[in-house]
């Protein structure tokens, strides 16, 4: 037995409902969304449609028109003298800003011609709003100079620079500071708080501080009345001293305000221009017995009552009459409650413009003899109001029907009318999940982009001279109706196809089974053992991947933007472009991954893994594959070179050590026999001289042998360090004392500058003593006789710095790095007893203990610096 709710006819009706109702809802929504300027919600739901003249829109346009005309009256009070426009009228911008409520300060003394201020605003006008040209630097920018009494004087950069170049003012400092000051002045970099000081020719301090003004200066198109510029007024008026920022703010406010008032006065920006509107207005100032109107027959104050009766008796007129007494207000708009609320909110403004006892009357000729905003709004209302009323009812109904159809289709998706719950999948449901989703979403995305590129507002209205948009309804052409309907239908179709396929996949449990992601996951377990390594590899390579993806997205934007912003797009070029984009994406991602693998390999080799092997087989040929092979060869070559170098170094070290040990035995015998021979008391002085020379050379050879052995141990790292806390001051005093005889023999004077308190370092005491002994011995051997040797120990933060300086006896015609190499000596003649290993050993031992050993040569000046971290003594 068939289940009726699964019957194919029922499914067809449900699908048609789910496709048609979104079209109805979309058209209804557009009409409703664009209709508030024409109809209120109450109007939309009325069974009987009210005339346009009884709508909020009509009343709103009337209120806007009255406000425009009152602005014109208000502007006339400001711009006129004896009833005539007066461009020569002087406006004190500070007083104007204060009375307008812009500032609370009672400032005055800066006046401009009214015509200049208005023209200033007109020249700066962009899109209806004046933007005054700012000055950030250059010759016209301002510099603030603070006097000794705390007051200020203002210069332009050009003026101040001239005074400095003429020496009328002088920078308190050296010539370099003057040049720096002029450079910073030219570039506008003078900052407050840098304590710049200026003096006059007699050296008297004039300005205690100078800085660039940053208070919103702008280009002065016109000068104040009777003055060169603003600065001349401010500098000569004590009351304005220090108020330059406020002056510029007030001036800008005044320019904007007067420019706007001029537009209102000349009726240039109003959509209700006199002579081109169906509006009649009558404003009365009872106190001054003045009438403002756009009808000549209403201008006589004595005929005001007659004029009002004329307006009220005209059957075509819709009018509003407003007075301070709310009970005296009247209108024929059939919206009394709203009318009173509209007007009472502006009572204070009406009083300000027309006096305490005012009368405001406005009327619109509803026969609409003039083509203005009222007539266009009326025509638009008559055309679209019936549809808006229907749309207000159709929209919720269509939404409910659509949701009901979708729920019903969700329940019966994949089921047939026959008995049983066997699930049937469509051929589309057997496609890969992501591919099906893309086919359902991509057409909608393209349609959305095309629609948004050609979209324009449905509001009907007009732009005025000041850039304002006055809307008077909604307009939707037949073509726009077709486009919206087609877009809604496509959206519903894509949704139903994708959504119902998703439901059937979930019911059949094939959503993940037929997923491309699952396929890639399964493939990754085959290609990369361990499953999770692929995700880890992608995460590790996220930086290069995201850079490539970002670059590719930027490429897509620039590629598709010109195409999608035009309506005449052919399908074939789009298909080809999409194919090219997919190919480019695959290439870029693969390229990025291979590049990252190359970078990882280089990093491994640079880190010492010279036997690193690149995954050459994974590269898809090309440059990266060749590069990886070459890098592997480089790694192998480096490894061979390193092994050979290490082998040679070991052989060299072993040779030095063995030879040194072999020399020690016969050398010890020579020294002993020389000592025995000296005890024989030979009388021949020649024999004694020979024995002295033999003893000296033997001792020198012994020292050289010991230095070579120690240098070999240091270079091979076979020395064991025993760290302890050592007082460097005490050790230096001991070293200087023990080597004082050597220094005196060379007529050298040690000038030591050591702290009185202990300076503790964490070192090997015996090795540190060897370092100090070596550098002091080096000074004793190679310093110029009769000179001073300077030993300085300083504490710089948490670091101790010991330096030893002397003047060399021999020319130092080599670099400091050469001196720390082995067997390099300070005398080219090699006539001294040194081995050339002292500084090399000292440097190696210092670095092994965590310190720094630095040499500095400047001519014949020789300087050694040893740096260690200071250890805080335990109290």
Image (cartoon, helix red, strand yellow):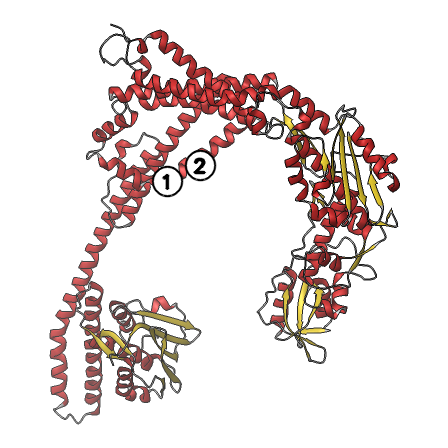
- Secondary structure found at label 1: helix
> Can residue 566 be seen?
yes
Give the left or right position of residue 629, taking residue 53 as reference. left
Point out residue 716 in the picture as x, y percentages from the top left corner. 20, 63
Q: Residues within 10 Å of mark 2 (few under 14, many from 20)?
A: few
Residue bearing mark 2 = 551
Rendering quarter of residue 310:
top right
Upstream in sequence: badge 2 or badge 1 = 1
Q: Depth check: 47 or 819 in front?
A: 47
Q: Is residue 794 above or below residue 328?
A: below
Point out residue 588 in the picture as x, y percentages from the top left corner. 39, 32
Q: Residues within 10 Å of mark 1 (few under 14, many from 20)?
A: some
Point out residue 392 in the picture as x, y percentages from the top left corner. 53, 23
Rendering quarter of residue 410:
top left
- Secondary structure found at label 2: helix
Structural distance between the alpha carbons of marks 2 and 1: 11 Å
Residue 544, labelled with which disc?
Answer: 1
* Residue located at (39% from left, 13% from top): 14
Q: If the image is split into quadrants, where does the C terminus sit?
A: bottom left
Q: Depth check: 16 or 163 in front?
A: 16
Point out residue 497 in the picture as x, y percentages from the top left corner. 38, 18
Q: If the image is split into quadrants, where does the N terminus sit?
A: top left
Give the left or right position of residue 83, taking residue 790 as reference. right
Rendering quarter of residue 777:
bottom left
* Residue located at (24% from left, 40% from top): 613
């Amino acid at each position: 037995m068939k289940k009726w709710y699964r019957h194919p006819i029922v499914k067809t009706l449900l699908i048609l409902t789910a496709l048609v109702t979104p079209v109805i809802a979309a058209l209804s929504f557009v009409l409703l969304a664009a209709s508030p300027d024409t109809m209120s919600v109450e109007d939309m739901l009325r069974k009987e449609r009210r005339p346009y003249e009884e709508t909020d829109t009509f009343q709103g346009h009337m209120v806007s028109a009255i406000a425009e005309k009152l602005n014109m009256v208000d502007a006339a009070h400001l711009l006129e003298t004896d009833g005539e426009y007066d461009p020569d009228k002087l406006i004190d911008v500070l007083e104007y800003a204060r009375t307008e409520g812009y500032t609370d300060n009672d400032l005055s003394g800066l006046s401009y011609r009214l015509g200049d201020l208005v023209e200033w605003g007109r020249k700066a006008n962009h899109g209806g709003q004046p933007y005054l040209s700012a000055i950030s630097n250059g010759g016209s920018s301002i510099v603030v100079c603070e006097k000794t009494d705390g007051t200020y004087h203002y210069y332009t950069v050009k003026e101040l620079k001239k005074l400095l170049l003429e020496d009328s003012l002088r920078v308190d400092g050296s010539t370099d500071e003057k040049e720096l000051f002029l450079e910073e002045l030219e570039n506008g970099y003078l900052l407050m708080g840098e304590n710049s000081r200026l003096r006059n020719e007699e050296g008297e301090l004039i300005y205690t501080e100078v800085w660039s003004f940053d208070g919103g200066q702008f280009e002065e198109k016109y000068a104040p009345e009777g003055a060169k510029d603003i600065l001349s007024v401010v500098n000569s008026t004590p009351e304005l001293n220090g108020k330059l920022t406020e002056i510029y703010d007030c001036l800008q406010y005044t320019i904007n305000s007067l420019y706007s008032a001029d537009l209102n006065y000349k009726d240039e920006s109003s959509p209700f221009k006199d002579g081109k509107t169906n509006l009649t207005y009558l404003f009365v100032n009872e106190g001054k017995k003045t009438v403002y109107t756009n009808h000549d027959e209403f201008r006589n104050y004595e005929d005001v009552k007659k004029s009002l009766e004329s307006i009220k008796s005209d059957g075509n007129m819709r009018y509003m009459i407003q007075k301070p007494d709310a009970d005296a207000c009247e209108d024929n708009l059939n919206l009394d409650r709203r009318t009173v609320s509209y007007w009472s909110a502006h009572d204070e403004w009406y009083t300000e413009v027309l006096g305490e006892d005012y009368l405001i009357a406005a009327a619109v000729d509803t026969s609409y003899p003039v083509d203005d905003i009222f007539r266009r709004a009326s025509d638009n209302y008559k055309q679209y109001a019936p549809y808006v009323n229907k749309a207000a009812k159709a929209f919720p109904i269509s939404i409910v029907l659509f949701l009901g159809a979708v729920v019903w289709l969700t329940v019966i998706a994949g089921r047939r009318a026959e008995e049983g719950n066997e699930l049937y999948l469509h051929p589309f449901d057997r496609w890969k999940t992501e591919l099906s989703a893309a086919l359902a979403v991509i057409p909608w995305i393209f349609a959305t982009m095309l629609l948004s590129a050609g979209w324009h507002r449905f509001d009907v209205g007009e732009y005025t001279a000041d850039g304002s948009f006055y809307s008077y309804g909604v307009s939707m052409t037949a073509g726009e109706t077709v486009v919206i309907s087609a877009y809604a239908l496509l959206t519903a179709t894509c949704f139903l196809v994708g959504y119902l396929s998703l439901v059937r996949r979930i019911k059949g449990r094939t959503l993940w089974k037929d997923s491309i992601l699952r396929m890639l996951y399964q493939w990754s377990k085959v290609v990369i053992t361990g499953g999770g390594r692929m995700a880890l590899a992608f995460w590790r390579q996220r930086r290069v991947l995201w850079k490539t993806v970002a670059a590719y997205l930027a490429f897509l934007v620039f590629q598709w933007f010109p195409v999608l912003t035009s309506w005449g797009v052919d399908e074939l070029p789009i298909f080809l472009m999409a194919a090219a984009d997919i190919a480019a994406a695959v290439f870029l991602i693969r390229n990025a991954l291979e590049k990252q693998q190359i970078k990882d390999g280089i990093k491994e080799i640079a880190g010492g893994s010279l036997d690193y092997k690149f995954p050459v087989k994974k590269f898809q040929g090309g440059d990266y594959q060749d590069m990886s092979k070459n890098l592997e060869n480089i790694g192998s070559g480096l490894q061979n070179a390193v092994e050979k170098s290490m082998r040679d170094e070991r052989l060299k070290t072993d040779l030095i050590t063995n030879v040194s040990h072999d020399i020690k035995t016969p050398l010890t015998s020579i020294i002993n026999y020389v000592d025995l021979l000296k005890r024989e008391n030979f009388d021949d002085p020649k024999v004694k001289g020979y024995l002295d020379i033999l003893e000296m050379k033997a001792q020198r050879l012994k020292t050289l042998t010991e230095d070579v052995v120690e240098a070999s141990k240091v270079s091979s790292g076979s020395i064991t360090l025993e760290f302890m806390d050592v007082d460097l001051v005490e050790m230096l005093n001991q070293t200087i004392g023990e080597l004082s005889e050597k220094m005196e023999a060379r007529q050298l004077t040690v000038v030591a500058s050591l702290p009185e308190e202990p300076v503790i370092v964490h070192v090997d005491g015996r090795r540190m003593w060897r370092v100090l002994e070596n550098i002091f011995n080096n000074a004793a051997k190679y310093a110029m006789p009769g000179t001073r040797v300077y030993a300085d120990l300083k504490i710089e933060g948490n670091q101790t710095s010991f330096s030893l300086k002397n003047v060399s006896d021999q020319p130092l015609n080599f670099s400091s790095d050469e001196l720390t190499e082995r067997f390099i000596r300070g005398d080219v003649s090699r006539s001294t007893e040194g081995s050339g290993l002292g500084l090399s050993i000292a440097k190696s031992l210092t670095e092994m203990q965590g310190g720094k050993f630095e040499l500095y040569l400047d001519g014949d000046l020789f300087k050694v610096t040893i740096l260690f971290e200071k250890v805080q003594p335990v109290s």
